[in-house]
Amino acid sequence: MPVKPVATAAGGPLDRFFGVSAVGSSVGTELRAGLATFLTMAYIMFVNPAILEKAGMDHGAVFVATCLAAAAGSLIMGLYANYPIALAPGMGLNAYFAFTVVPELQGNWQLALALVFVSGVLFFALSLSPLRAWLIDAIPMSLKLGIAAGIGFFLALIALQNAGVVADDPATLVTLGDLSKPQAWLAAAGFLLIAALAVRKMPGAIIIGVLAVTVAAVALGLEPWHGVFAAPPSLAPTFLKMDLPNALQLGLVAIVLTLLLVTILDTAGTLIGVARQAGFLDKQGRLPRLRQALLADSGAAAFGAALGTSTTTAYIESAAGVEEGGRTGLTAIFVAAFFLLALFLAPLAQTVPLYATAPALLFVAFLMAASLGALSWDDPTDYIPALIIVLMMPLSYSIATGIGLGFIAYVALKALAGRFSEINAAVTVIATAFLLKLIFA
């Protein structure tokens, strides 16, 4: 929407560096947009430590790593690419890290961090080459939609487990959890609160829901109160703990490939989505400064791994800031500043229980699953591979397996239908790599 610039801000150093007035914005508007974006994505500083703690990592150190990675990534995006797009450790990728990669590595989260770092470096190298556009454009839209929705379903299963709504069962694999426990009902109430606030377009709906469940849990005596403000915890337990010497084993290629592929697709989807809303795309639908944006994202991924967190990536919640009028990288700079201030909220993060973060996971899951609506439902060779991805991610408890089976099914169905022209080299290579992994792993 059009924004009237503030006369007092025009001509200042921030205005000149970011070109704020030139795009019809103002420093005040960019500040308000930065706050809106921060409030919509601040849940990650509570959710990410709770998830990675399950992988054996130190909660306090991950909290600091999450805030610093978000601040650094957003700062790079704002200064280098000049886009109002914030970054933080990604939802879905953190679940893949904690519940698939680390268990597959027998609990070696240090090696898992090294694989995140390697994938970030490879993404950075790809972003410097013409291959970036080729790879992004070569993945069929149906598979991109299936990956987004599949990660959503995977997150939904994790959320329902954390809330105690579903539980394992030796006869049926999954069954209804013990709903006599108040934790499940608090999580359900938190989800409904988030959804209701989102419908009313309330900024910070997700963080409000998480904090409301936490306050209720403390008031009911279900959780201890650790306070709100304190000096940041030590980053030492995770900082530079990557096991790089063992990260280049041939048997780990599939994990790195999955991290790389999901990161590229997630980043591309977020960048295009936010750019379309902000009106940044050119007449051909291309994003100016795509190279700078991808370099910022990939650099943040590698830096976040060094700090001690799963893959850092662009956040679709940046759309909230765009709605508030944010049009330049100054919005991302303000988001970075807010995450640095949030470092002093470690006691509050420690207070938030796992079932209080479950509503946030579930709500994000539904947002991601909505991408199924864009599938071509009149073409089985498109929607069947996508649905295989959607079903197999949660059922195999592995994002990598879901992606692999979907790509294999896509190539097989297109070939059996005689539509060889729709099978490109990138999809064939990825499908073949996953097929070999499944056969010989």
Image (cartoon, rainbow, N blue to C red):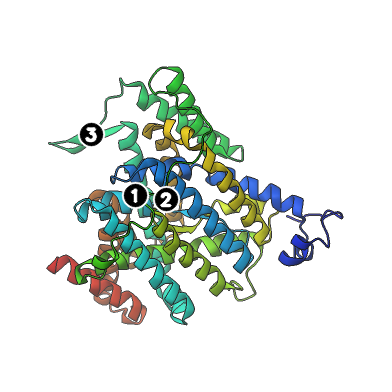
Secondary-structure class at tag 2: loop
Q: Residue 175 carries which label?
A: 3
**Which quarter of the figure has residue 113?**
bottom left
Please report whichever mark, 1 or 3, sits nearer to the chain's N-terminal start. 1
Residue topped by disc 1: 95
Q: Which residue is found at the position 13% from the left and 68% from the top? A: 439
Mark 1 and mark 3: span between their CA atoms? 21 Å
Q: Are marks 1 and 2 in contact (CB under 8 Å)?
A: yes
> Residue extending furthest top?
220
Q: Which mark is residue 91?
A: 2
Please report whichever mark, 3 or 2, sits nearer to the chain's N-terminal start. 2
Mark 3 and mark 2: span between their CA atoms? 25 Å
Mark 1 and mark 2: span between their CA atoms? 7 Å
Secondary-structure class at tag 3: strand
Q: In this view, does 361 lie to the left or right of 252?
A: right
Q: Looking at the image, can residue 173 be seen?
A: yes
Q: Which residue is found at the position 87% from the left and 55% from the top? A: 7
Q: What residue type is labelled 2?
A: Met
Q: Where is residue 164 in the image (x, y as percent from the top left)?
A: 31, 31
Residue placed most toward the observer, 147 or 245: 245
Front tag of 3 and 2: 2
Q: Where is residue 140 in the image (x, y as percent from the top left)?
A: 40, 70
Q: Which residue is found at the position 68% from the left and 61% from the top? A: 328
**Above or below — where is 436 with respect to 49?**
below
Badge 3 density bin: few <14, some 14–19, many ≥20, Cα 10 Å: few
Q: Which amino acid does label 1 sit on?
A: Ala
Q: Which amino acid does label 3 sit on?
A: Thr
**Above or below — where is 422 with respect to 56?**
below
